[in-house]
């Protein structure tokens, strides 16, 4: 039996990633818009990825009463003391395209040598079941920041985040899912949901 979960995101590429990873559980991710629900503007004023994921999930759950999954993720660069971190989507201006954000990041790192360009992606996922039970998990992926973008896959900072010398934007989707912060977090969520099959 297929089970619908509302995914609190407007990012179609993120939705596709979530769909791929949750498919084995028979979960069908749908957007709030597809269910005729307007989530409005949610103020993400948490101090951590986990807090922001919960804020988004709770706002969606309060409006629809259906099982909800929300995530908050970002890029943390060691040479920038963890920036842009929870402000990754707002880095360089909330409405600026990621090409602009990436160029700004590369400009900030232009004098940083390769061994010091370490970074990680973090992803916090919050799931609220129909019962109101909250499941929170987090995933992480270590990598480096390249000196120039490469690849046309993925989204966000993927063109400059590299693992093993290859950017996320150059990886096939199954390989990215295996390595990525979101993949790691969602696999943890899958394990948690497996233990609650009767509640879904």
Image (tube, rainbow, N blue to C red):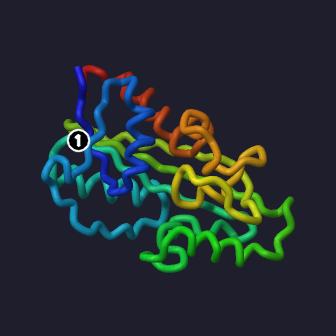
Q: In the picture shown, does residue 117 fall above or below 192? A: below
For the point 41% across and 40% down, the residue is 18
In the drawing, does residue 14 fall left or right of residue 82?
A: left
For the point 48% across and 79% down, the residue is 93
In the drawing, does residue 44 fall left or right of residue 146?
A: left
Q: Secondary structure at mark 1?
A: loop
Residue 115: x and y in percent read 86, 59
Q: In the picture shown, does residue 66 fall above or below 23? A: below
Q: In the picture shown, does residue 73 fall above or below 183? A: below
Q: Quadrant of residue 112?
A: bottom right
Report the number of discs: 1
Q: Quadrant of the C terminus?
A: top left
Residue 109: x and y in percent read 75, 73
Furthest residue in direction left, as rendered: 36
For the point 24% across and 29% down, the residue is 3
Q: Quadrant of the N terminus?
A: top left
Q: Which residue is mark 1?
A: 132
Q: Nearer the viewer, residue 132 or 1?
A: 1
Residue 50: x and y in percent read 45, 54
Q: Nearer the viewer, residue 190 or 144?
A: 144
Furthest residue in direction front, as rendered: 152
Residue 25: x and y in percent read 36, 24
Q: Nearer the viewer, residue 170 or 129?
A: 170
For the point 27% across and 54% down, the residue is 58
Residues packed near mark 1 inside 10 Å, few (<14), some (14 to 19) or many (20 plus):
some
Q: In the picture shown, does residue 131 fall above or below 153? A: above
């Amino acid at each position: 039996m297929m089970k619908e979960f509302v995914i609190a995101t407007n990012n179609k590429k993120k939705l596709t990633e979530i769909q791929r990873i949750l498919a084995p559980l028979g979960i069908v991710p749908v957007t709030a818009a597809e269910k005729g629900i307007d989530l409005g503007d949610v103020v993400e004023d948490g101090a951590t990825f986990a807090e922001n994921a919960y804020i988004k999930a709770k706002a969606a759950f309060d409006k629809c009463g259906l099982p909800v999954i929300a995530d908050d993720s970002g890029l943390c660069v060691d040479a920038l003391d963890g920036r842009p971190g929870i402000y990754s989507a707002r880095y360089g201006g909330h409405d600026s395209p990621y090409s602009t954000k990436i160029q700004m990041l590369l400009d900030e790192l232009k004098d940083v040598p390769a061994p010091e360009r370490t970074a990680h992606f973090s992803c916090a996922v919050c799931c609220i079941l129909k019962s109101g039970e909250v499941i929170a998990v987090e995933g992480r992926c270590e990598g480096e920041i390249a000196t120039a973008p490469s690849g046309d896959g993925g989204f966000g900072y993927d063109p400059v985040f590299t693992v093993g010398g290859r950017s996320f934007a150059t990886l096939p989707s199954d390989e990215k899912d295996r390595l990525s912060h979101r993949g790691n977090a969602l696999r943890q969520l899958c394990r948690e949901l497996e233990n609650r099959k009767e509640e879904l």
